[in-house]
Image: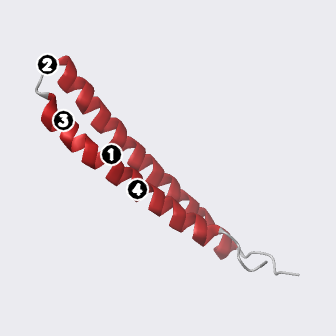
Amino acid sequence: MSEPESGFDRSVRRTQWMLAGLAVLFVTGIVTWIAHLIRTAWRLQDVPSASIGISLVAIPVFLTLGGVIVYVFVGLLTDRSAR
């Protein structure tokens, strides 16, 4: 039987979940902002080559970064002592 979690362990786990959530919010905000910039360039009839070129690189980079951060935090938060 395992020991019950202490208050410190619960606060560390809560902080880790909070950091993972903040990372998801950050990446979602960046992707939304880039999509807004593309829509604004389209509405203003700007040359879309720079907007689309930047977004083709930036969006997958931020999505990959967000995926890696979430993967790491889920790995940290998964209790592997039961295995």
Of mark 3 and mark 1, the one earlier in the sequence is 3
Where does label 3 land, which residue?
51
Of mark 4 and mark 3, the one earlier in the sequence is 3
For the residue pair 80 and 47, the one nearer the viewer reads as: 47
User: Residue at the location (64% across, 75% down)?
Assistant: 8
Where does label 4 land, which residue?
64
Above or below residue 8? Residue 37 is above
Task: Find the distance from the CA under tag 1 to the CA under tag 2.
Answer: 22 Å
Where does label 1 land, which residue?
59
Task: Find the distance from the CA under tag 4 to the CA under tag 2.
Answer: 30 Å
Q: Is residue 15 visible?
A: no
Residue type at mark 1: give it.
Answer: Ile
**Label 3: element kind:** helix
Query: In which quadrant will I find the C terminus?
Result: bottom right
Give the quadrant of residue 65. Answer: bottom left
For the residue pair 46 and 21, the one nearer the viewer reads as: 46
